[in-house]
Amino acid sequence: MASLPKLNEKYSMFSCITDDLETKGFRFLFSAKDNLTSKDMETRCGSRILEGYRPVFDATAIDRMRKAGGKLIGKNSMDEFGFGTFSTNSAFGVPKNPFDPERSCGGSSGGSACAAALIDGHISLGVSTGGSICCPASFCGVYGIAPTYGRVSRYGLIDYGNSLDKIGLISSDPNKLTEFLPVISGKDPKDPTSCAQPEPGPKGRKIRSAAVPKEALESISKDVRSSFESSLETLKSMGVDVKLTEMPFLKYAMPAYYVLASSEASTNLARYVGMRYGRQDGDLTLKFDDYFASFRSEYFGDEAKRRILLGTYARMAGFRDRYYAKALKVRLHVISSYKKVFAGCDAVLTPTMPFAAPRFDEISKMAPVESYSADYLTVPPNLAGMPQLSVPCGYDGGGMPIGMQLVTDHWAEDPLLTFAADWESVFETRRPEVSP
Amino acid sequence: MKIGLEVHVQLPTASKMFCSCPTADADTPNTHVCPTCLGMPGSRPVMNRKAMEYGIMLAKMLNCEVSDTVWFSRKTYFYPDMSKSVQITQYDNPVGSGGVYSLGGKKPIRITRIHLEEDPGKTKRVGDQSSLIDYNRSGIPLAEIVTEPDLSSPAEAREFLKQLIADIRHTIDLPDGGERSIRCDCNISVGKERCEVKNVTGLRNVERALTFEAVRQTKVLKAGGKIDRETRRFDEERGVTVSVRKKELESDYGYIDEPDLGIFRIGELAKSISVKESPLEMSVRLSREYGIDSKAAQQIVSTSVDLAKAFEKIAAAAGSAQTAMSWTAGVISANWKTFETGGGDIEGIVGIVKRFSDGEITDVETGMELKAYMTGTDIRTAGDRSSGLDQIIEDYLSAHPEIISEIRKNGKAVNRIIGHVMEETRGMHSSSDIVSAAKRIIDSKI
Amino acid sequence: MDRETVEKVAKTARLALSEEELERYSRDLSEILDYFRILDESPEGDGVGVDPVEIADIMRDDVPGIFMDPYELLRDMKTYENYVRGPKLL
């Protein structure tokens, strides 16, 4: 605990660390992505516009972790409101990859994965809208699960896309995922979307068959391909029947996701107008429209503005049918297509990301579309509300971790957790060398 | 002239639409608030079942088709009193649509839709410096009723609203004075293009605003001008409408679905909710079923729906609708308020009229007993005060002898006698009884 | 997306963009919308698409209650006599 501030100076995985470093009386330590409200720590979502927001309530997930004996040690840095793949769109420190500080942790739950990789036995809460748990888990060489939409109450989650956001867990130890997912899951009368979930199924169900979409292997790097292929061999030796399948529906998931996510985001971000919470230091003698516009332009970051514009456009009368309404119907198509796949196998298997963690200088040269398309494997299950798991499955020539993603049908988290524990016994995970 | 209304009615739930904050008036601003109605980041809405039920009741009252599956939408607009800059409302699949509502039992007014939404907070204007917001109202459930432009005059619009409010009060059991303010957006066109007068409060102002608009538009058109499609505001003090801005385009709202609430399969719920007969429907039915004059039926229903119910019981007991009607419209109606306040039992009244129709008691005795029973006074006092209609008229005539010659010149002067007797006997005698008694007495004096 | 459209959208979203931003977002958004074009050819599914899993009929009883101190809620807000202060209206 004492070395935490120093460690953070180097890796920036926390945007805020608790003042009270006393850990006596707590069963375990945990951290939470900074879009989950916490009573004792400022919650800023990686955005300057929320500077000074001191929530009066804990997010249900945080509350349940505390009640289980956990101590919240800090809030994890993240892309502003979750908008990003590399956690570089953060106003309060960009987390550095534990395996190479010149490289990204992934995003948008980059700080959560970074903390999970750096701190022994740590568990962190992440949030996934378009793969934001699996991506950083893959880049940081740790285990991450984003359960079914509605499994974990979103009360206290500062919204990105309400029909997509899923709260999940990241840890270097898969048994922690098994231990803590039931802690944060369950119905919560404060979030109606958590109240339709069935009880978890019987424990210990194994994944016996998995389908690998051909489309997934089209644009992955050489290193990712070789790690993934050798993992398939390991899977076969574990008794998992793996088959290659065509899943043409996957290609529609990305655009549908970006339309829905940015449409919803643009309405969620409408509330930030320099009143009531966060920064409120504008000139109130301005006419309200001008006040709002000047305030929002000043304090929203570049990517936030881009998504607000995109989302506002996609839901405007005249364009709404072509984009927003269409994307809803495409999502229904993606969901029913996944269901057909799951009628014949237990899981869909892909690499998590098409490449290992890129360097920051490479990221800064990427056009928006380029960085958006890096999520083409993690977005489809998130669009469909399916549970998704990323496990480390290899390392490239430079020692950077590579991840593999498993997706199961709605509400079938348990086979994923069982798999993660089994995988740990056959795959040798490396830990980063930490020098504060 | 075409007028269409968008009527906003606050629903009388005890808690707000999406949070448990009380809807009751508060002494201090921003005390009936919570993270949800303040739109704080991380808060979430949870639907109030009662608000949904009220919505269904009103949809049925307006003869709308109630959708099987409904959900909510987000309407984005930026204003200081809109805490999330998003209003949760209904866009696709509102609770009811395609209804018809009969104005005065005659003219059908088409109802486009009825949907549920949340009220914004209230803004207090202060000088030029800044605005002050009270979010106590934020999140109070509203039903918005949208009509087709089927109303043809400001007076008719007022009549429509008056009847609508009475029916709503009756349907959702609002206590007297329990209704909150009615707010209307009024669309009116004299020529081709329409204007919308936003947020007019109260019946009288709706009529005033529409009348002003009708005159204004007519003048513009007569002078060869063109009406701009625009939003206007009604200045209550000056009684005029003023342009506020070009009509905010529907496209600016950018409606999307509200995922936080899920969907509502209300088909079964809607079937289980039956809507009470509205006052208007009741008077139409009474007139038809009992063969009584429609004006008289309307009269007793508008006095009180319970009085009309009493009439039905009396008619059944007396075996004659005419007998029941003459007692109901006369002495029973006259003493109804006192009776209702005292919380008396209607069976007593039924019993007295039944004894009359069985021939057990006379006309005068019945009147005395009813009055005594309903007012809780001693029968002798009641009797004293009504000691013969003739006596009262005689006394009045000897005190005011000039009335007889006035009546000969102008029959309407008999109203003075009616007024006096009504006052003296607290309405125990019907005006027709008084007139015939007065005629008989005056004739005998010649 | 042309500059004019970006300007209109920005106004609707209450963003005041600089010349440089208008230029850049116009370029970015055109690229992104191009990338979305594939949506047009996607098959469509049936049903209600509000949420990815069915969430139906979750409602609460109409029971009023105040669970948080309203003064605590206003703690960090700019207020005047317990009103929340906002910008000028007209």
Image (tube, grey):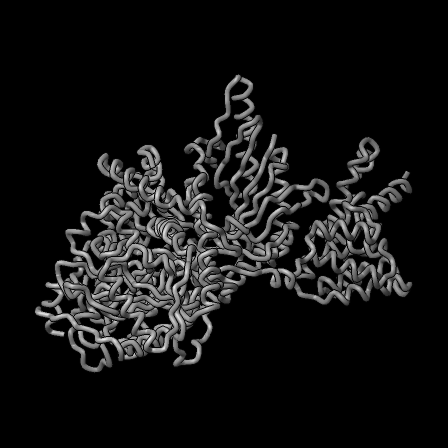
Q: Quadrant of the N terminus of chain A?
A: bottom left
Q: Is residue B221 above or below residue A277?
A: above
User: Between A306 and B221, which is closer to the camera in this rendering?
Assistant: A306
Residue drawn 64% across and 54% down?
B60
Left or right of residue A245: residue B296? right
Q: As rendered, which of C48 and B345 lies closer to the eye? A: C48
Can you tell which quarter of the image residue A212 is in? bottom left
Residue at 43% across / 43% down in the picture? B253
Q: Residue at x 82, y 31 (%)?
A: B409
* Above or below for A204 versus B199: below
Q: Nearer the viewer, residue A30 or B237?
A: A30
Q: Is B429 above or below relative to A399?
A: above
The answer to whether residue A343 is visible is yes
Return the x and y of residue C86 as percentages of the image width and height. Answer: 31, 46
| Quarter of the figure that contains the C terminus of chain A | bottom left
Q: Position of residue A13 (x, y in %)?
A: 18, 64
Query: In this rendering, would B400 be left or right of B343?
Result: right
Tell me which corner region of the image, top left, top right, bottom left or bottom right, holds residue B249.
top left
Q: Position of residue A150 (x, y in %)?
A: 41, 66
Report whether A267 appears left or right of B404: left
Which one is in front, A418 or B380?
A418
The answer to whether residue A190 is seen in the rendering is no
The residue drawn where x is 21% and y is 70% is: A116
The extreme top residue here reads B223
Q: Position of residue A409 (x, y in %)?
A: 43, 68
